[in-house]
Image (cartoon, rainbow, N blue to C red):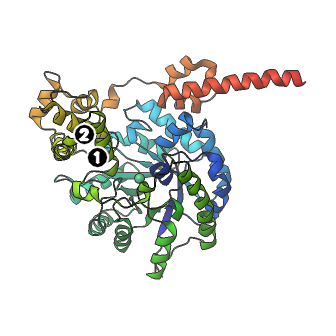
């Protein structure tokens, strides 16, 4: 029998985030939820740090309510979220009580799969979230932040996968956030992991460099079980490869694909209209949908390159771009080859620009890089250059063990602090994750409810 390849649809999360900065309001995709539910996807990715942030910051939506509404419209398809390990949705580490309650509530509100990663691939930063996911009865998807460096060998990745399995991972995801994984690399890496563990493997990449279709194909040949794709109008460029195109090609090659073409056509037709609206108002920039091979030349993710450019532009130092490009991999090496994903990509990029502009390396160092050198982000893939670490930390000693162990529980105190502003644990969690945004949101909600209440008394 033909081997089955399954699909994760990313239009609600990653495609939405990569192309239009997560600006899709619930009302815009609601009409398609029932169709997506019937289409035969393995899962629909619908939640993550940026979704949460943008819901509160720009869309005036309660992210928890969004999740419950999606759940109600999609009873048959697994819902998936992306979780940054001990960072949960944010950029710094949280105490365990928050991580545990967040995972528990995400699952209670309808999440089926929690894809858990760490920017440094330090599994001790993933453990609490992995265990909480298993405890809540959901699927823990242990995730590798894919990067290349002399220390990122298949042997190391396989070791990581084994540790994730120990922690209860039900699936493994290889997450290539920059779209730099090529087809041969995908074939070799998937083969190595398949040989080592008997778990379904999901590959996640981006079309940025144009490699993605080929990368998926070779990954499938090596036995990958699940691929992440976006419905065609929201595919390509910084987003994922198109769902329908991959389905067509894989069927032609004899693989079993359980997607319903009538449903995917309906979803595509609908999202064409949505895409055109975002193109018309300028939220969607055509260049986001184009192929950009610069990252292959520099091995630097696309988002980081544009950040470098805009920083230099702000400083009126665009002539230093080449120097900053050469400095970036050097800083990455000094810092022990972190994968270039949020927040390490920002740290490395800013430090490289600072080094170049100051004309002296590490003369000025951000508080994030200092914290990184103290070990607050976890164990680095290779040791930080001892001389640089000493230069940055002075006499301060780096941390031994896990940073989160030094943090005090936060949930109970926040609950008390918020009083009746927070009606539920979900409100408390939103506040801990995004204090300013959530406070504003909760206050506005309260004001609205009080108005409604007065109004209804008059009505009576
Ligand atoms: Co992605």
Q: Position of residue 265 (x, y in %)?
A: 60, 69
CB atoms at circles 2 and 1 under 8 Å apart? yes
Q: Residues within 10 Å of mark 1 (few under 14, many from 20)?
A: many
User: Which quarter of the rendering shows the C terminus?
Assistant: top right
Task: Look at the numbered disc 2 and say if its residue's Cβ is closer than 8 Å to ligand 1.
Answer: no
Residue at left offset 35%, top offset 70%:
214
Q: For residue 113, say whether it is visible.
A: no
Vertical comparison of 15 with 254: above or below: above
SS for dot 1: loop
Viewer-closest of 430 and 368: 368
SS for dot 2: helix
Q: For residue 266, say whether it is visible.
A: yes
Question: For the view shown, which residue lies furthest in the right direction?
Answer: 460
Q: Position of residue 208 (x, y in %)?
A: 37, 58
Viewer-closest of 429 and 358: 358
Residue at left offset 33%, top offset 51%:
302
Q: Quadrant of residue 97?
A: top left
Viewer-closest of 8 and 444: 444
Vertical comparison of 230 with 443: above or below: below
Residue at left offset 61%, top offset 35%:
60
Q: Residues within 10 Å of mark 2 (few under 14, many from 20)?
A: many
Question: For the view shown, which residue lies furthest in the left direction?
Answer: 387
Whole-angstrom CA distance, mark 2 to mark 1, is 8 Å
The residue to which callout 2 is attached is: 348
Q: Which mark is residue 340?
A: 1
Which numbered disc, 2 or 1, marks the residue that appears first in the sequence?
1
Q: Position of residue 204 (x, y in %)?
A: 40, 58
From the viewer's perspective, tell me whether residue 34 is left or right of residue 83.
right
Q: Position of residue 23 (x, y in %)?
A: 54, 45
């Amino acid at each position: 029998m033909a081997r089955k390849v399954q699909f994760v649809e990313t239009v609600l999360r990653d495609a939405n985030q990569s192309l239009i900065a997560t600006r899709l309001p619930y009302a815009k995709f609601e009409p398609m939820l029932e169709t997506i539910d019937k289409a035969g996807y393995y899962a629909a990715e619908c939640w993550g740090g940026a979704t949460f942030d943008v819901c509160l910051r720009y869309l005036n939506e309660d992210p928890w309510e969004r999740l419950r509404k999606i759940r109600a419209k999609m009873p048959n398809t697994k819902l998936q979220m992306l979780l940054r390990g001990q960072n949960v949705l944010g950029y710094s580490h949280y105490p365990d009580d928050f991580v545990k309650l967040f995972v528990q509530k995400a699952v209670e509100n309808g999440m089926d799969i929690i894809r858990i990663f760490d920017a440094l691939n330090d599994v001790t930063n993933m453990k609490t979230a992995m265990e909480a996911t298993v405890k809540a009865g959901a699927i823990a998807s242990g995730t590798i932040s894919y990067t290349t460096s002399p220390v990122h060998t298949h042997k190391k990745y396989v070791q990581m996968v084994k540790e994730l399995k120990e922690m209860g991972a039900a699936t493994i995801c290889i997450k290539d956030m920059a779209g730099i994984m090529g087809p041969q690399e995908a074939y070799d890496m998937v083969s190595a992991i398949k040989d080592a563990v008997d778990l379904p493997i999901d590959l996640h990449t981006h079309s940025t460099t144009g490699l993605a279709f080929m990368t998926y194909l070779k990954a499938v040949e090596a036995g990958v079980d699940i691929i992440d794709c976006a419905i065609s109008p929201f595919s390509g460029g910084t987003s994922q490869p198109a769902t329908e195109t991959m389905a067509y090609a894989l069927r032609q090659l004899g693989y079993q694909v359980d997607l319903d073409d009538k449903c995917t056509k309906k979803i595509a037709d609908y999202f064409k209209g949505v895409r055109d609206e975002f193109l018309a108002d300028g939220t969607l920039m055509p260049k986001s949908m184009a192929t950009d091979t610069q990252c292959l030349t520099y091995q630097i993710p696309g988002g980081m390159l544009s950040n470098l450019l805009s920083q230099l532009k702000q400083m009126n130092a665009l002539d230093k771009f080449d120097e900053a490009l050469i400095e970036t991999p050097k800083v990455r090496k000094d810092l022990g080859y972190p994968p270039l994903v949020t927040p390490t990509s920002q740290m490395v990029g800013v430090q490289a620009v600072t080094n170049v502009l100051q004309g002296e390396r590490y003369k000025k160092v951000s508080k994030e890089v200092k914290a990184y050198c103290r070990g607050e982000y976890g164990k680095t893939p290779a040791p930080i250059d001892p001389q640089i670490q000493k230069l940055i930390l002075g006499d301060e000693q780096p941390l031994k063990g896990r940073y989160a162990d030094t943090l005090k529980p936060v949930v109970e105190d926040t609950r008390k602090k918020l009083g009746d502003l927070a009606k539920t644990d979900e409100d408390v969690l939103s506040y801990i994750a995004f204090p300013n945004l959530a406070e504003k949101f909760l206050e506005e909600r309260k004001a609205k409810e009080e108005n409604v209440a007065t109004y209804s008394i008059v009505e009576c």
